[in-house]
Image: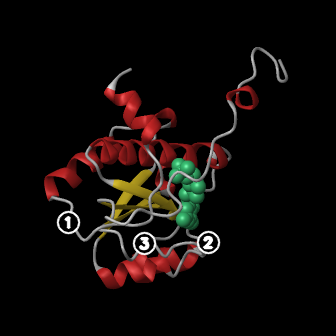
Amino acid sequence: MSETYDTIVSKRDTRRFSDRPIPPDTLARLVQAARMAGSAKAAQPVRLVLVSDQAQKERLAACGNFTPHIPTCQVAVVFVLVPEAGVVGAPFAIFRGPFDAGRAAQNLMLAAWAEGIASCPASMHHAEQAAEVLGLPEGHVVANVIALGYPADDPDPVLGTRPRLPATDYVHRNRWGE
Ligand SMILES: Cc1cc2nc3c(=O)[nH]c(=O)nc-3n(C[C@H](O)[C@H](O)[C@H](O)COP(=O)(O)O)c2cc1C
């Protein structure tokens, strides 16, 4: 077993954060981890908006239906897809853009967890409202928002309560059902 493997399999989404700030150099490393994710055809359609302003975190939280954790996090990292990279609205948009954003977001969350920083994604159900709150240019869309922070002393009651499928249901070999 490697430390990398342990970090990956122990990562759980956490919605309860402490007040401890994330040092700027640590945040810079997490951003770098996201930035280094590959993208389809190296189109690099992902940009980040780092939201640490409290009022702005609250405005962002109002754009999702399951987002009470956003105002309590230290930094909400917004993953934005840009149209210039030919992703938003293009035929491959449905596969490429969200996949690229997901890769970058997972890089960021795992790099964070390796340093003891918890995280939880959030969907922006009211996507146009989120774009307006963030002042995104025309055609830019929010893929996801990752709430970051050191875990609170009182643990998140949801933590670890979502079991994974048994491996036998999860994996098929050569053909479906085998
Ligand atoms: C694309 C995506 C969107 C999500 N949106 C939300 C959300 O809006 N609010 C929330 O509390 N959790 C959200 N989650 C977190 C999931 O609920 C979480 O990954 C799942 O429950 C598994 O959690 P675990 O790894 O702690 O077991 C989202 C996760 C993903 C991958």
Give the amino acid type for the residue marked by disc 3 in the picture: Ile
Q: Is residue 151 above or below residue 45?
A: below
User: Residue 46: x and y, percent?
Assistant: 43, 51
Give the amino acid type for the residue marked by disc 1 in the picture: Pro
Q: Is residue 171 above or below residue 92?
A: above
- The answer to whether mark 1 and mark 2 are in CB contact below 8 A is no
Q: Let me know if residue 87 appears in the view.
A: no
- The answer to whether mark 3 and mark 2 are in CB contact below 8 A is no
**Quarter placement of the C terminus:** top right
Spatial CA span between label 3 and label 2: 14 Å
Q: Quadrant of residue 176?
A: top right
Ligand 1 quadrant in view: bottom right
Instruction: Decide which of tag 1 and tag 2 comes sooner along the chain.
Output: 1
User: Residue 166: x and y, percent?
Assistant: 69, 33
Q: Is residue 122 rendered to the left or right of residue 4?
A: right
Q: Nearer the viewer, residue 44 or 22?
A: 22
Q: Secondary structure at mark 1?
A: loop
How are the colours assigned in the image?
A: secondary structure
Residue at image position (45%, 77%) is 60
Q: Secondary structure at mark 2?
A: loop
User: Residue 136: x and y, percent?
Assistant: 43, 71
Residue at the top extreme, as displayed? 174
**Residue at mark 3:** 70
Q: Secondary structure at mark 3?
A: loop
**Residue at mark 2:** 125
Spatial CA span between label 1 and label 3: 15 Å
Instruction: Decide which of tag 3 and tag 2 comes sooner along the chain.
Output: 3
Classify mark 2 as within 8 Å of ligand 1 or not, answering yes or no: yes
